Amino acid sequence: MLKTFDLVLIGVMTATAAITYTIKHRAELKLEEVHRLEAEIKLEKDTIDLLKADWALQSQPNRLERLVKAYNDELQLQPTESTALVHAKELPMLKSEVPVPDVTEAKAGAKGATGASATAASAKGATVAAKGQPVPKAAPRGEAEDEAEEIETGSVE
């Protein structure tokens, strides 16, 4: 009887040793993976620092001024005028912010209203979104610019 109990204990000890070895081996593999990932992260950080330094060198005002003078005949660069800049409210909206047009009001407004009243009704409908939020309008520009250039709103997601 003692021999079978001894054999059972030896089997349990062998199984426990095998499980312990397996766990230790997996932990060592994970530790190696952690060290490899840390090395990759360090390499990426070093690359980012190098690229930032390169950008600082490339965008130095003295260097850019020399390039402008060297290629002025080909590029014909002009300083940016303050009127060429736009405000944030003049930029196109995100696709998720574009108001959904109400088809029923548009049909009713088109049938019932004529002339100037139809224009006022459509302008009123255009300034209020389906959720009651006002739609931002661009600053007025010349009529020729409006007809010549249309800006489509795109998704910025």
Image: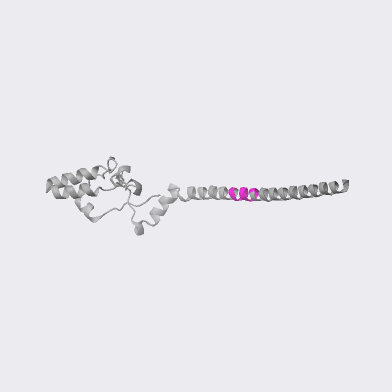
Q: Position of residue 123 (x, y in %)?
A: 20, 45
In terms of secondary structure, what is the magenta stretch mainly? helix
**Residue 1 drawn above or below residue 71:** above
Residue at the limit of the structure toward the bottom, as seen here: 74
The question of residue 38 being in magenta is answered with yes
Residue at the limit of the structure toward the left, as seen here: 115
Q: Is residue 71 left or right of residue 48?
A: left
Most foreground residue, 112 or 82: 112
Q: Residue at x 53, y 49 (%)?
A: 48
Q: Position of residue 47 (x, y in %)?
A: 55, 50
The question of residue 120 being in magenta is answered with no
Q: Magenta region: which residues?
A: 34-41
Most foreground residue, 85 or 115: 115
How many marks overall? 0
**Residue 23 drawn above or below residue 75:** above
Q: Residue at x 79, y 47 (%)?
A: 12
Q: Quadrant of residue 89?
A: top left
Q: Quadrant of residue 87?
A: top left
Most foreground residue, 29 or 91: 29
Q: Position of residue 128 (x, y in %)?
A: 25, 42
Q: Is residue 18 left or right of residue 74?
A: right
Residue at the limit of the structure toward the front, as seen here: 1
Q: Position of residue 42 (x, y in %)?
A: 60, 48
Q: Colour scheme of this structure image?
A: one colour
Q: Residue at x 35, y 47 (%)?
A: 96
Most foreground residue, 92 or 10: 10
